[in-house]
Image: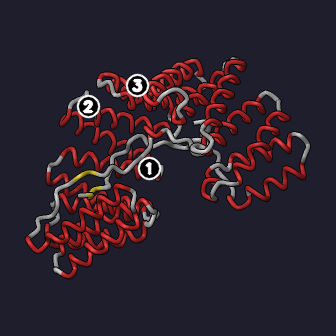
Amino acid sequence: MLNSIVARQTGKRYNFLACFSLILCSFIAVIHPALSEEGSAPGAKWQEVEVQAESLFLQGSFSEAEKHWSAAEAQAVQEKDELHLAETLNAKTHLYIKQKRYAEAHDDLVKALAIREKLLGASSDKVFETRGNLALIAHKLGKDEEAESLYKQTIVSKRHAQNSTSLATTLTNLANLYTEMKRIEEAKVLYLEALDLDQKALGKDNKETAQDLFNLGAMFYQHNYNKEAVDYFKQALAVYSTLNDIPGQIKSYHYLGLCHAEENTHDAAIDAYRKALSLHTRLKGENHPDTFVHQLNLARSLDQTGKSGEAEKLYQSTLAAANENHREAKMKTIECTIEYAHFLRRHSRQTEAEKLLKNLLPAYETLSVADRKQLYEMPRIYSDVLKELKKDSESDAMARKHLHVFGTTAKTKTHQ
């Protein structure tokens, strides 16, 4: 059954330029298979419909999956089978999350939680599961106080149940929340406790332990404590290397590069970026779109160390690779172009940057509003380049047309 959407931090990326997705490092909700509720013979029809709904969802047939879940829900109500109703309400949350229907997910999980608490008791794993799911949804809705309260309730219950690995998951999820709320000291305490629990239960050379170390690094990196972050990323890398976990090594090298670049130790950054690129290329293939982030980061650090010729060749080859995948990876093409334009500006080649961005603008304008907002950097840099070329009216027109609807954007770490 589709049940838990609770997931530990899996390398949440902070403040990346535009929308580059280092897929191996993104925060994702993992769907775990779980045992179904204890049911009786009358629930057989419900079970059949529920299984069909889940199968359709996994196949991507979302509208049909919703129809089947609604039928399963109606069946459970007709049979007055509250446990099966809770199971359906909880499972349907995956569809709502996929479609960003968070308010509906919240309502269903509140109902499911009330049923499970009443019939299964506060110490049931099903109650832990639903409360954790509800906390994640509450956070997505901006209800951070509710999310915090739910996590804390679950932590108290899990401490009583003495389930260390399950407790470590909830500690990590609350730490994630505190990290986003900039409550770094509280987050650190929780991450360290999760690390201690996993080391004792699973050993020091375990993937969960490596992830705990990585989470601590990510927290410090987000809050600009780069030297502390480097220490934890190196510890995570050592464990991932022992396990021959290639994705783990990639994200560790990636973040080590970012930290070193922030500290202007670009030789160390270059070394880390090269290793991340080599491993990711081996995993995904030459010039795969997922490797572009490493190539662009590497190019920027090369440029910072005076190797502008090598950097420009890398910018150009990455952009060429992105153009070859234009239909499938338009966003990547735009991101790569923006980075190359930044390079040209740094070297006072505004005329070339203007031409590059002018050719890119039609593709940018075909994107959805959400994608254009995500890539606001494109019209911003275009407007700046025009201003530098003394084309003030064109610059202002660009800003009015493409930037005013997005509002002001706080300065964040870039080129990540």
- Within 10 Å of disc 2 (Cα), the crowding (few <14, some 14-19, many 20+) is some
Q: With respect to residue 125, does 291 lie above or below?
A: above
Q: Position of residue 320 (x, y in %)?
A: 66, 31
Confirm or deny contact between disc 2 and disc 3 (CB under 8 A): no
Q: From the viewer's perspective, is the residue at label 3 or at label 1 nearer?
A: 3
Q: Quadrant of residue 336?
A: top right
Horizontal arrangement in the rendering, residue 1 relative to residue 104 (left or right): left
Where does label 3 land, which residue? 234
Tell me which amino acid carries mark 2: Asn
Where does label 2 land, which residue? 206
Confirm or deny contact between disc 1 and disc 2 (CB under 8 A): no
Q: From the viewer's perspective, is the residue at label 1 or at label 2 nearer?
A: 2
Horizontal arrangement in the rendering, residue 20 relative to residue 377 (left or right): left
* Secondary structure of residue under mark 2: loop
Question: What count of labels does the image hold?
Answer: 3
* Secondary structure of residue under mark 3: helix
**Which is more N-terminal, label 2 or label 1?**
1
**Which is more N-terminal, label 3 or label 2?**
2
Where does label 1 land, which residue? 183
Horizontal arrangement in the rendering, residue 33 relative to residue 94 (left or right): left
**Which is more N-terminal, label 1 or label 3?**
1
Q: Position of residue 131 (x, y in %)?
A: 28, 62
Q: In 3D space, how far apart are the residues under numbered discs 3 and 1 (Cα atoms)?
A: 24 Å
Q: With respect to residue 68, does 158 lie above or below?
A: above
One can see residue 7 in this view: yes
Q: Position of residue 275 (x, y in %)?
A: 48, 21
Tell me which amino acid carries mark 3: Lys
Query: From the image, which quarter does the N terminus lie in?
Result: bottom left
Tell me which amino acid carries mark 1: Arg
One can see residue 148 in this view: no
